[in-house]
Amino acid sequence: MSEKLPRTEMPCQKAEERVKNFNEVALGYTDEMAKAEASRCLQCKNPMCRKGCPVEVRIPEFIAQINNGDLEKAYEILKSTNSLPAVCGRVCPQEKQCEAKCILGAKGEPVAIGRLERYVADKALAANKKTAAASASKDVKIACIGSGPASLTCAGYLANLGAKVTVFEGLHEPGGVLVYGIPEFRLPKSIVRQELEGLKDMGVEIKTSFVGGTTVTVDSLFEQGYKAIFVGVGAGLPLFLNVPGENLIGVFSANEYLTRTNLGRAYDFPNYDTPCYSGKKVTVFGAGNVAMDAARTAMRMGAETVHIVYRRTRNEMPARLEEIEHAFEEGVQLLELAAPLAFKGDELGKLRSVTLQKMELGEPDASGRRSPVPVQGSEFELETDLAIVALGTRPNPLFIHNTPALELNKKGYITVNEETCETSIPNVFAGGDIVTGAATVILAMGAGRKAGAAIAERFLK
């Protein structure tokens, strides 16, 4: 019986080897591994796994094609709803979405849907398989501001229906958080570029160095004849700790640190002239996926020790379990039940230590997690020459401040119609982190797809 077959593990680089390089940690399934894992799928008549996917990938159908040996058909099924399957197969939290709904998970381990998605997509990219391009058969121009997963999904959806889609990106390289936020060892940039080339093959035009809210605005796009605009500019303004000494040399937001190492390729210095501030004793504040990315990057950049400081315990850490386990395997250490009080520097203004205070868990807060409570008189010093703050982000202010007609919620994010993703400005739609706050790639893609469907219903019928 397929439900009794063990889940097929994916091979990885050994921890002692991978911590010295930026090559991808997970190595992917072989053909035999993929066949074995695909054979576990029960092919449910009412597939709950699909209901758990924000972009509604036809999961049993593509897995069935793996069993049939028809990977081309499997890829075609994936691409019919997911513009970036090679990306999603790597970075989506499947354990909280599609795999969480898999019936096999009730008594054992769910089908490794994400790993199979990656396998099929990687095979297609390696063979240079291209999705059939839909000619721009409709004389309808659509603009997408930002080139992260929400915008790219919206663009791909509409281009496939014959719209003329242009994506405007503020930086010199498209991809948004896929390029500047997620490290190379989790998501190789070559994969992102191949996925982007696939969108270009579908007719999507991508323009870089166009900053939403300044060099490209809602009004200017409508004046140029664009019928609808999708806004996917993210929530890239970092949150800080607001403690003394946070302006010392050596204290960085995770956004800046990861952007330097990823988009600037500082990990390959001096081949790329983008040096990154490095430290021997690194402390990361936060316990989400971005914190794990920053901590693991610091290890690869030559740190002797890397500590993650978290106000709660390991049990409450919000990062993906796989990322937490990989971080600790690579030598990252956890200082749980601790919070920063102040940073201290030397006479030149360089960071030298952080004062921490021990915490204990009190009553649950609004999120359901027990609130950390300071333990009086428990202060201690931790030697630190590089601190990385990974506490989350706020809305991208540039676009919002220059688009005053947009309605915002009390946290400053764009409000949208839940059914269509349309904003308070007619024919302007939005999705991703600029609407929800920091969330997952696949949730942003789900919003892009929903907005794309609404735009298509209005302009492409």
Image (tube, rainbow, N blue to C red):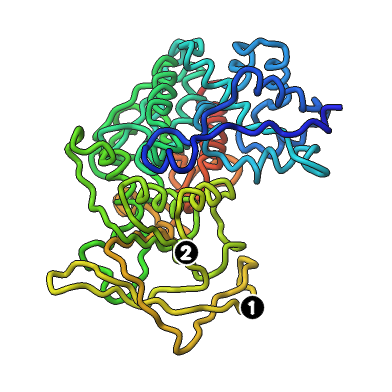
**Residue beneath the point at 68% across and 38% down:** 98
Please name whichever residue, 268 or 54, is drawn nearer the observer in this view of the structure: 268
First-in-chain label (1 vs 2): 1
Q: Is residue 393 above or below residue 266?
A: below
Residue under label 1: 363
**Residue beneath the point at 74% across and 41% down:** 101
Name the amino acid, label 1: Glu
| Mark 1 crowd level (few <14, some 14–19, many ≥20, 10 Å Cα) | few
Residue under label 2: 410
Residue at mark 1 to residue at mark 2: CA–CA distance: 26 Å
**Residue beneath the point at 57% across and 32% down:** 11
Q: Is residue 91 above or below residue 30?
A: below
Please name whichever residue, 238 or 209, is drawn nearer the observer in this view of the structure: 238
SS at mark 1? strand
**Residue beneath the point at 43% across and 21% down:** 199
Residue 150: percent from the left, percent from the top?
Answer: 47, 37
Callout in the foreground (1, 2): 1
SS at mark 2? loop
Which quadrant of the view contains residue 174?
top left
Q: Is residue 321 above or below residue 30?
A: below
Can residue 239 be seen from the camera position used here? yes
Q: Is residue 357 left or right of residue 54?
A: left
Q: Residue furthest right?
A: 1
Residue 344: percent from the left, percent from the top?
Answer: 26, 75
As drawn, the label of residue 99 is none
Name the amino acid, label 2: Lys
